[in-house]
């Protein structure tokens, strides 16, 4: 059974460049969140969030341009939430607490990395920690019930990711 997948060069280069340019522009309405996952173990800077899809509907007009083509490629049948996160550099490589993004049993979590940096996403798979480096245009897919955390970057000022939580049209991904 496959528990996670890493796909490098996930998006065609022209689509990726446009998505990255738009998301990193000054036209995105970022909202500040003081706590990332857990008040006891949190990034001191907080982070910024931009929702593409929330409450069972698109939350911004860029959903159609940025996200629909990606969801089609992911074979998504039902979307739970899609949001972009912007994290500012911290002086120490601290991490957030292990967590899951949704309680939906048959869903997939995807993280599309938009920044090359020393940040890492750690998955807890079969009582072992799997480390995934932050590399531009890399997609990390995993069963949403797998706990994960982020080790924050210290080498670049801003780290961007897009977080997807969805139910696939077919469940073949976990039966390989």
Image (cartoon, rainbow, N blue to C red):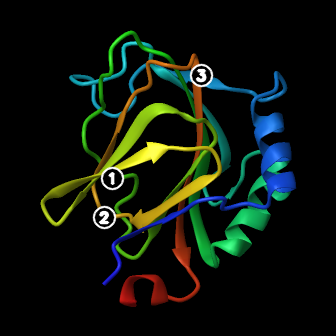
- Label 2 neighbour load within 10 Å: few <14, some 14-19, many 20+: some
Which structural element holds mark 1? loop
* Residue 161 as seen in the image, left or right of residue 58: left
Q: Which residue is tagged 2?
A: 145
Quadrant where the C terminus is found in the figure: bottom left
* Residue 123 as seen in the image, left or right of residue 137: left
Q: Position of residue 28 (x, y in %)?
A: 78, 29
- Label 3 neighbour load within 10 Å: few <14, some 14-19, many 20+: some
| CA gap, disc 1 and disc 3 | 23 Å
Query: In the rendered image, which quarter is residue 71 located in?
Result: bottom right
* Residue 164 as seen in the image, left or right of residue 125: right
Q: Is residue 37 above or below residue 61?
A: above
What residue is shown at x 58% (from left), y 35% (from top)? 116
- Which of the two labelled residues, at mark 3 and mark 2, occupies the earlier sequence position? 2
Query: In the rendered image, which quarter is residue 34 located in?
Result: top left
| CA gap, disc 1 and disc 2 | 6 Å
Q: Which residue is tagged 3?
A: 158
What residue is shown at x 30% (from left), y 32% (from top)? 96
Any mark on residue 100, and which? Answer: 1
Q: Which of marks 1 and 3 is in front?
A: 3
Q: Is residue 164 above or below residue 174?
A: above
- Which of the two labelled residues, at mark 1 and mark 2, occupies the earlier sequence position? 1
Q: In this view, does 67 lie above or below 149?
A: below
Which structural element holds mark 3? strand
- Label 1 neighbour load within 10 Å: few <14, some 14-19, many 20+: some
| CA gap, disc 3 and disc 2 | 28 Å
- Which of the two labelled residues, at mark 1 and mark 3, occupies the earlier sequence position? 1
Q: In this view, does 29 lie above or below 136?
A: above
Q: Position of residue 13 (x, y in %)?
A: 80, 54
Which structural element holds mark 2? loop
């Amino acid at each position: 059974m496959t528990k996670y997948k890493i796909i490098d060069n996930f998006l065609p280069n022209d689509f990726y460049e446009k998505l990255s340019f738009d998301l990193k522009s000054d036209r995105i309405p970022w909202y500040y969140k003081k706590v990332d996952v857990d008040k006891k173990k949190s990034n001191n800077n907080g982070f910024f969030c931009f929702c593409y899809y929330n409450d069972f509907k698109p939350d911004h007009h860029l959903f159609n341009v940025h996200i629909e083509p990606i969801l089609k490629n992911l074979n998504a049948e039902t979307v739970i939430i899609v949001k972009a996160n912007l994290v500012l550099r911290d002086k120490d490589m601290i991490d957030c607490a292990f967590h899951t993004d949704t309680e939906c049993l048959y869903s997939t979590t995807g993280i599309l990395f938009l920044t090359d940096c020393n940040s890492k996403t750690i998955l807890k798979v079969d009582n072992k920690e799997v480390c995934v480096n932050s590399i531009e245009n890399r997609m990390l897919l995993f069963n949403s019930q797998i706990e994960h955390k982020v080790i924050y970057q210290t080498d670049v000022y801003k780290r961007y990711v897009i977080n997807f939580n969805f139910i696939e049209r077919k469940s073949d991904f976990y039966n390989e």
